[in-house]
Amino acid sequence: MADVWEKVNRAPARQEEVMSECVSGYIDHIIFRNEENGYTVLSLKGVKDEEELTCVGTFPVITQGASIEAQGNYTRHPVYGKQFQITEFAEKMPEDALAMERYLGSGAIKGIGAALAGRIVRRFGADTLRIVEEEPERLAEIKGISEKKAREIAAQIEEKADMRKAMMFLQKYGISLNLGAKIYQKYGDSVYGVLQENPYRLADDISGVGFRIADEIAGRIGIHMDSDYRIRSGMMYTLQQAAGEGHVYLPKEELFHRASELLGVDESYMEKHLMDLSVDRKVVQKEENGSVLVYPSRYYYLELNTARMLRELNVLCPEDEKMVQRRIAQIEKETGTVLDEMQKKAVTEAASHGLFILTGGPGTGKTTTINAIIRFFEGEGVELRLAAPTGRAAKRMTEATGYEAQTIHRLLELSGLPEEGRDDRDVHFERNSENPLEADVIIIDEMSMVDIHLMHSLLLAVTAGTRLILVGDENQLPSVGPGNVLRDIIRSGIFPVVELKKIFRQASESDIVVNAHKINRGEQVVLDNKSRDFFFLKRQNADVIIRVLIALIQEKLPPYVEAKPFDIQVLTPMRKGLLGVERLNQILQRYLNPPDPSKKEKEYGQGLFREGDKIMQVKNNYQLEWEIRGKYGIPVDKGVGVFNGDTGILKSINEFAETAEVEFEDGRWAEYSFKQMEELELAYAVTIHKSQGSEYPAVVMPLLSGPRMLLNRNLLYTAVTRARKCVTIVGSEETFREMIRNEKQQMRYSSLDIRLREVTE
């Protein structure tokens, strides 16, 4: 497609003027850009006698909003009409009326929005800057500005004169006004020195400035590719990106290779800088089996401290074995359940250890075992707390045990952040080492989803003497955040672990459970559709697959599983592509929540939200307030924090207030500003990764070919085990069989097990 754009646009154009001309204006938006060669088609506004001018040219770096002065010729394109062919350009200090309009309309001056800024500049034109600085009282000539308001604006402008100059200076480097304001708040007048000396500091110090933005600024300032600052910053950025993939460290060779590709600098430059980073305590290097592992310092210490705290909890709590057996027999009698040997062993181990791990796949009786453990401790008269990583998993735990379960964040009493947090390290919990949890026994379910950050925060709030019981299925996908906590704890071999393997009779009648275990063992599944809860519909065309999905969700499955269409979940391995989340959501929205005059809509990015949409929060927001409403909509509980993976329904859109209201599955209501809605996505289809810890009445999974790394056994196992009553896979049988054969999981670099063995020796 890109090639077509270039070919068409570069078709012969008839030149109207041979003489080189000069135009100036600001880049309103980029129509097309080829990142490889820099060929760009852009719209220039503010050009004399032109409402909007289409320009073409090759630019190494170009920024929307930048003010430029360009040399070139007017041409007439046979398809696109009049254009300006840029031969050379320079960004100019944007101290003209346009820059002023953008500055005033950015929200920097309280009481002036974009519309009012436009009226001011239209009234005073090129003289705006002088009027604002020298005669601000004249702003009262503008409709909508009283004399009092003009005086308030004048005072703010005077107060913020330095800030305005700095922001206009930053515009020169392609920094937007919003980001410019953040940078100025951080550095004040020293911003000029920071930029000239080491712009890479921005990536460390300011939320919203990543390495790439800092690198672009550095390139414009003229900092060399092999500058020390650049290489160090690039290596830290590489480790940060790796943490985003779930890694706690990178082997040195892989770090050098990745950083070299990012920076376009030879690997031989890296060694010296790695030593410097170690000396500055930015990284920790550890030798393991002849290989050097490089950790960002905070991740190394997170794992080390987590290991120490786990070790402290691992104490023997001797119980009279006969008494325990009598109690188990009593529980069986009271509940009418019969526990097998492994389940009884789990209750015994939980009773006699400070830290205990229970693991097992679907249908192996984990819930029955948890219930027996709860009853055992209840009989002891102890204080119990139950928690899980997500709202959905906590709700399931409550339903399964009859005991109130919370999210781990609520258990630890999350408090909002004082300022915009950069990531999980800034999260503040009221429960910590100074104010620990008041409980004798804490049971955490769905442990495979817990990352190293959350585990560390939880352990800080658990005092020695409190029993901690961790429950999960280590064959599920690992946590979204860094680390591989459950698997590493089990792998360390230090703690008592009971793995439930026996599939119980009731569960063995379910092909979902039987097939999930087969998939996990790498055995092929019979696809003859004689099953009552596991179906495979063979289809080879993406559009046919989508038609089948719609028919299943709208007509076939709801009566079969006694659920509403909204409760049936489409799970797919990928985000992009013909059967990726993005495309499926747009199509499913059309069928499951069609347009209606009574439903308000809000456009975002490439799509739109509509009242009644099924949505998902896609990033942790520790500051967003929520409330639980009782009868008549009266709030009965309040709190903060909405998390990645929380799903709900978009209840209302208020155009006037520019807000939207969402009701989450666990009954929480939250209000989003339009700006915050970028944290939401449609959730008619979600990736299998995002479905972790959730359970649905029915799961529908489209399946065609895709990247081998994504299509593996682990992913398929996780998808199948999300369904309570029915799994339907629609697509290629060969891809399905290949997934079962493909054991290859993305290697996750974590080392909590090594740290555990170290602190135990």
Image (cartoon, rainbow, N blue to C red):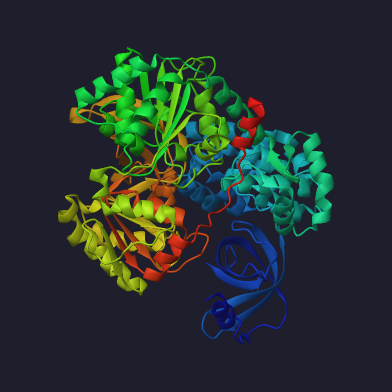
Left or right, 307 with respect to 450, comes to right
Q: Is residue 715 above or below residue 369?
A: below
Q: Is residue 381 above or below residue 727?
A: above
Q: Nearer the viewer, residue 49 or 225?
A: 225
Res 501 seen here: yes
Q: Give the residue displayed 62% in from the left and 41% down from the top.
A: 248
Left or right, 89 with respect to 583, comes to right
Residue 204 is situated, as x and y percent measured from the top left of the image, at 68, 39
Residue 756 is situated, as x and y percent measured from the top left of the image, at 61, 30
Q: Give the residue displayed 59% in from the left and 85% down from the top.
A: 11
Residue 92 is situated, as x and y percent measured from the top left of the image, at 71, 57
Left or right, 78 with respect to 291, comes to left
Res 131 seen here: no
Left or right, 725 with respect to 229, comes to left
User: Please, which residue is most extreme toward the front here?
Assistant: 322
Counting labels gives 0
Q: Nearer the viewer, residue 331 or 179?
A: 331
Q: Nearer the viewer, residue 117 or 380?
A: 380
Q: Nearer the viewer, residue 730 or 428?
A: 730
Quadrant in which the C terminus is drawn: top right
